[in-house]
Amino acid sequence: MTSNFENKNILIGISGGIAAYKIADLTSRLIKLGANIKVVMTDNATKFIHPLTFESLSGNQVYHDTFQRTDRWDIEHIALAKWADLFLIAPATANVIGKAAGGIADDLLSTTILATEAKTIFAPAMNTVMYQKPVVQDNINKLKGMGYIFISPGKGRLACGDWGEGKLADLDTVIHYMENQLCPDRDMEGLRVLVTAGPTYEPIDPVRFISNRSSGKMGYAIAEECIQRGAKVDLVTGPTNLSPPAGACIYNIKTAEEMYETVLELYEKANLVFKTAAVADYRVKEVASNKIKKGQGPMTLELVRNPDILLELGQRKVEQILVGFAAETEELEENALTKLQDKNLDFIVGNDVSTGESGFQSDSNQGILYSRDGGSTHIPLMNKREFAHRIIHEIIKQL
Ligand code: PMT
């Protein structure tokens, strides 16, 4: 049986992290799948694992020693950049991510990243604190916005002894991402998809607002997956710290009422709607025009209901396929199915947010996709991009 890796040229860039040893196994698996593998290592990576390992596994010379190859260096990085059908950087350290985000090319790996036009995937692995540092997250977001693909690291015990986010994603996930880039599903070509993401901000006065903890990650992952599958995407987004997915038409909104107006304008042309946003159900009745001064006693705010956008979409539905989300901490099935029914949806993702590992703000998610015909698909904990892939795959299959 032929695999999607058969005769594909895969360039693997290894930077200096302990997870470098796992790339030997990855190389071996990709070779068995029929890929041609070439490896570029940073000097630090060669201290974690010897290049001979990759030369033996791949049958090709390993590229790393820029200083001894000064006369051929330019040729090498351009030749490698052109040779690759796909470029994977794993493990990707904070350093190599920072260099790529800043356009710095000071060794063979960073120069090849800059020189290649091949689809490039980063699989970061580093200490949790480093991974979560705003500067690293900003660099990742910047690169994502330029079309680079990131595989979120897993959680667990790290080599430094800490527990948390930062382990190299498991190799099955890495292979899945690579396969998806080599042979992307283009089953959404011709479709126009409307995605909502993030929170809404409901103002109290000029400096305060009511909101929730939605980061926008889930909605942005859905938008990215739809774009990759060939759809035209309108992304209506509340305030987030994320870079917009490359190729999406972005509509920035703040309040639920603004989201309502924008979504209804776009709805007629949409074939498929993913209502991922966490919309505030209430807003303050009278927004103060000046900053409210604190008094001595308690304070009361009168709240009024916001429009239920999805309910309205369900009532106006002509041929659109409506996918809702329900973030639940208990009675997931019952609550999700009630929303599916009440809002006249075709699908709903019952999003289990009972643990900190999924739902709001986290990089991963888990839940159950329910369809109006009574079907359900359990989707275990996985990163949000993968989760988006799974629900969209399932929906397209059922349609
Ligand atoms: O943004 P992240 O940090 O990645 O987190 C993702 C998420 C947890 C926010 C997302 O996966 C999710 O579950 N979104 C739904 C949040 C929710 O609880 O919605 P709800 O149960 O209040 O509403 C159900 C559905 O109706 C949702 O599709 C919602 O967008 C929609 N709705 C709700 C209220 C309202 N006024 N208008 C709406 O359209």
Image: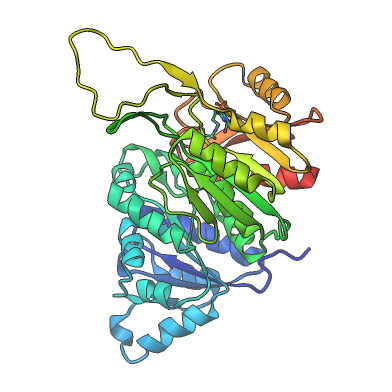
Residue 16 at x, y percent in the picture? 33, 61
Image coordinates of residue 243 in percent, x first then y, are 42, 54
Give residue 310's position: percent from left, percent from top: 63, 32
Taking the image as shown, residue 9 lies to the left or right of residue 95, namely: right
Ligand 1 resides in the quarter of the picture at top right
* Residue depicted at 68% across the width and 70% down the height: 6
Quarter of the picture holding the N terminus: bottom right
Instruction: Out of 203 and 213, give the one closest to the viewer.
Output: 203
Outermost top residue? 297
**Residue 93 vs residue 176: left or right?**
left
Q: Quick one: which residue is furthest to the bottom in this view? A: 71
Residue 181 visible at all: yes
Residue closer to the observer: 237 or 373: 237
Foreground pick, 148 / 26: 148
The image position of residue 3, as x and y in percent, is 71, 64
Quadrant for the C terminus in the image: top right
